[in-house]
Image: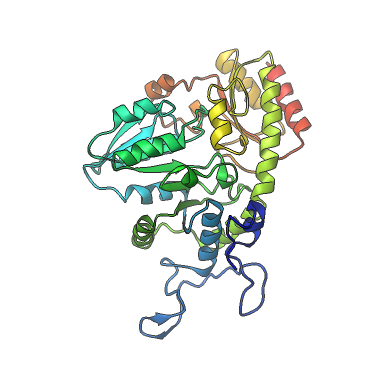
Amino acid sequence: MSWSPDKFGFDTRAVHAGQSPDPSTGAVITPIVLSTTFEHSSPGQHQGFDYSRCGNPTRAVYEECIANLEGARFGFANASGTVGVTTIMHLLQSGDHVVAGDDMYAGMYRLFEQIFKKNGISFSYVDLSDSKLLEAAMRPETRMVWIETPTNPLMKMVDIRELADISHAHGALLAVDNTFMSPYFQQPLALGADLVMHSSTKYINGHSDLIGGVLITDNEELAERLTFLANAVGGIQSAFDAYLCLRSLKTLGIRMRAHDSNARTLAAHLETHPAVERVMYPGLTSHPQHDLALKQMSGMGGMISIFLKGGLPAVNSMLKSVKVFTLAESLGGVESLISHPPTMTHLSLPEDVRLSLGITDNLVRLSVGIENVEDIIDDLDRALDAH
């Protein structure tokens, strides 16, 4: 059965797309196929799988489902989000140029600057919330534009459709890290992007118990190249982790609605708190790009960044006082997490770069979980009052 987005809603497709009962046993849930190798009936003749690096039945079902949720045909499950980005960068060659958003996960900056720059690929970092700056940054050798929206950790918005038009006019691909929103709230391919990447460690899996990444495209030529790279580079996701992600997709819509509802309530509350200097959340009318968020996203997600009054001492007091929130890196799990980007997720950024972006010592990032929102609010109120 074809689980077309035109005929079925997101939650229905999350439960069923690509997931027919097992033909040999009738099992409703896709089995975990741990075999590394598969029988050939004769040399070169097999049932679609020959070696699990090239393709695995469990992983293939997950890849079909997540691609369907992004409105695409081709998915590629990776061992981590960083492996996914590494695979994307192998689409390029020495001498190529990439324009990337200036505010992004620091691990990407490290990967670009310390790995691929040494391989002859050049990078320009631009505030892509202003599309005019992208136009100015494009070069004849620009082959890719890399964006996050909302950005990590400053929650800036980037106009995907506008940047896709500019990228394509210059012969470049547009790749979008869609981790913060998940395919439930934002679908970059429908807005003109060529590639979507997720750290599936985050909202797609949603339970803080695996590391993974996924690449998605509806472009057949790109899919052919990514198929080659998945096999040749070999950074594929294990069958067991693919099974866990597939399990989690079934509740993605329900979880994202809960994250969104809690975050909206919390963000509005924090805006009124006397210890908070500023709240960055696209769902607030005070966000400078709130109108863009309404235009290209169907929800605002569960990520909030706040700036505290009182500087680093206030931050340290708050982080030591939380009980419902857990002080930890990562995001997107069912549990609420709190982090300090300058000393945790973005520590690898050079200090001058970090400060120039506005990632100051009083910045705190919240990944709002699905607990009772009253408990979430009370926890932060107590922690903010502790100093």
Coordinates of residue 381 in the picture (x, y in percent)? 73, 22
Q: Residue furthest bottom?
A: 42
Quadrant of res 41 = bottom left
Q: Looking at this view, is 110 or 175 the one in front?
A: 175
- Above or below residue 279? Residue 175 is below
Q: Is residue 45 left or right of residue 13?
A: left
Quadrant of res 337 = top right
Coordinates of residue 196 in the picture (x, y in percent)? 46, 47
- Above or below residue 300? Residue 268 is above
Screen quadrant of the C terminus: top right
Q: Is residue 165 left or right of residue 118?
A: right
Q: Is residue 369 visible?
A: no
- Above or below residue 348? Residue 83 is below
Screen quadrant of the N terminus: bottom right
Q: Residue furthest front?
A: 6
Q: Is residue 242 left or right of residue 217?
A: right
Q: Residue at x 38, y 42 (%)?
A: 174
Q: Residue at x 54, y 64 (%)?
A: 61
